[in-house]
């Protein structure tokens, strides 16, 4: 009569994620893309180590899709100039490396791309803390008043 508890949990999590996406700033959406790619790469690493070829392919394909259709397509090369061009080249490199990782079942390549994505995500998060970049004022520090 009722679906499994797991189905309900997944539906609730999906609604929570969708609400987060709708309410997120453009900056937060990029962070969510980085996080999604990193989750997929963690799954791919587990699959490579356990010999689960189907899950490896699925997870690496998801990471490539996030990088190509999410991060790369979000770049504004006119406004971003050389930085956007450099990021585009880096994202292209990452996707190519992940294709190689899939063919060779090479965890080292996946870890290389993880490190690059973590570095970019951390830099992106640091930008969020800079009001000159985001245009958002920092809250007043009432402790010093």
Image (cartoon, helix red, strand yellow):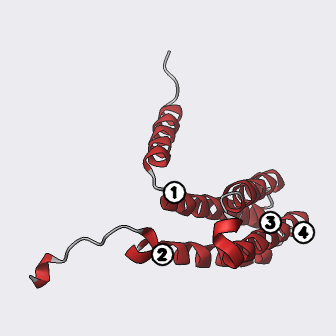
Residue at 91% over, 64% down: 103
Q: Dividing the picture into quarters, in which one does residue 45 lie?
A: bottom right
Residue 127 badge: 2
Residue 26 badge: 1
Q: Real-space Cα distance between discs 4 and 1?
A: 35 Å
Residue at 81% over, 73% down: 93
Q: Real-space Cα distance between discs 4 and 2?
A: 36 Å
Identify the element where label 1 is drawn.
helix
* Residue with the most extreme right position: 103
CB atoms at circles 2 and 3 under 8 Å apart? no
Question: Does the image show residue 130?
Answer: no
User: Is residue 54 positioned above or below 142 on the image?
Assistant: above
| Tag in front: 4 or 3 | 3
Q: Real-space Cα distance between discs 4 and 3?
A: 14 Å
Mark 4 or 2 closer to N-term?
4
Q: Give how far across and how far down residue 114 sits, in percent.
A: 67, 73
| Tag in front: 4 or 1 | 1
Residue 104 badge: 4
């Amino acid at each position: 009569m009722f679906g499994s508890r797991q189905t309900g949990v997944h539906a609730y999590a999906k609604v929570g994620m969708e609400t987060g996406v709708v309410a997120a700033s453009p900056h937060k959406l990029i962070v969510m893309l980085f996080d999604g790619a990193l989750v997929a790469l963690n799954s791919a690493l587990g699959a490579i180590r356990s010999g689960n070829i189907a899950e490896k392919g699925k997870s690496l394909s998801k990471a490539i899709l996030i990088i190509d259709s999410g991060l790369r397509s979000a770049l504004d090369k006119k406004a971003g100039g050389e930085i956007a061009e450099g990021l585009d080249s880096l994202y292209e490199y990452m996707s190519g490396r992940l294709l190689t990782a899939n063919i060779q079942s090479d965890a080292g390549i996946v870890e290389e791309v993880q490190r690059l994505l973590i570095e970019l995500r951390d830099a992106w998060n640091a930008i969020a803390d800079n009001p000159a970049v985001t245009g958002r004022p920092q809250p007043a520090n009432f402790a010093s008043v």
